[in-house]
Image: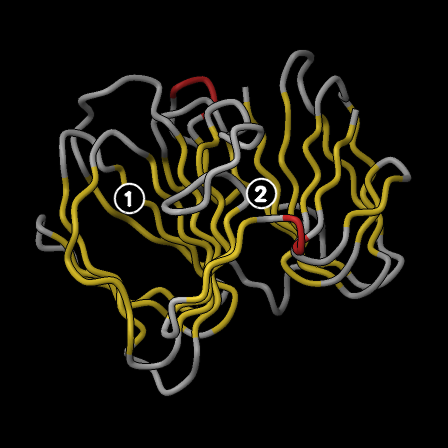
Amino acid sequence: MITVSSFQHFGHQDHGWLSACHHFSFADYYDPARMGFGPLRVWNDDHIKAGTGFPLHGHRDMEIITYVRRGAVSHEDSLGNRGRTAAGQVQVMSAGTGIRHAEYNVENEDLDLFQIWLEPDENGHQPRWDMRTFDREHNFHGFVTLVSGRHGREHAGALFIHQDAALLAAVMDKDQSAEIELEVGRRAYLVPARGEVEINGVRIPERGSGEITAETQLSIKALSNAEVVVLDLP
């Protein structure tokens, strides 16, 4: 079963410096019918103006993935980590027992990103931060696993999270197709970062979403040039 939501149907908040779209209940947006999807608790589609950002604040016991679509975000945290994550890159922060961080757009252009929060497999992990590059300009050969904690272990080339989940992404030309297999009993959450796609014949609009359950084979076709992000979830 594939349940489709459009970008317009999500929660929207305009803070001036930040234009935020919330796929699930978050901050001042509350919808009791949209509290998460399995361990997926937050999927925010954020537009952050140049020279602004999130000042130092704290998190704990959450796996936070940042997927940058345009521009770059600069990170610093209470562990001493500093880094710049640009379009085509992804970062992971395991908040664990507690971490304070700031995220700023210090560039001369606006920033677009997905921020994705997953509940961990258990509380109390050691906090940490890491990042990696997804080559969007040259990767037209199907889905790449960017982040994974499947079966509780690390996977080659992927950032680790403390949850039995995986984040995959692909760049697709119009009319290109790709396949994803899901284990029986698992679910997936798919978002076209740009372009439109069909999953098993069901159309998913740009920056909308598909909640996928009771499917083991996903046939994904790009209806236009597209960039597609998928979470494989328990």
Question: Given contact means CB atoms under 8 Å apart, are the residues at marks 1 and 2 in contact?
Answer: no
The quarter of the image holding the N terminus is top right
Secondary-structure class at tag 1: strand
- Camera-side residue: 88 or 78? 78
> x and y percent of residue 190 in the render?
66, 41
Secondary-structure class at tag 2: strand
Residue located beneath label 1 in the image: 93
Please say whether residue 157 is visible from this viewpoint.
no
Amino acid type at mark 1: Met
Is 187 above or below relative to 204? above
Left or right: where does residue 121 sit relative to residue 60?
right
Task: Tell me how many marks there are.
Answer: 2
Query: Mark 1 and mark 2: span between their CA atoms?
Result: 17 Å
Left or right: where does residue 234 sit relative to residue 63?
right
**Looking at the rendered structure, which numbered label has been put on residue 168?**
2
Left or right: where does residue 181 sit relative to residue 124?
right
Q: Residues within 10 Å of mark 1 (few under 14, many from 20)?
A: many
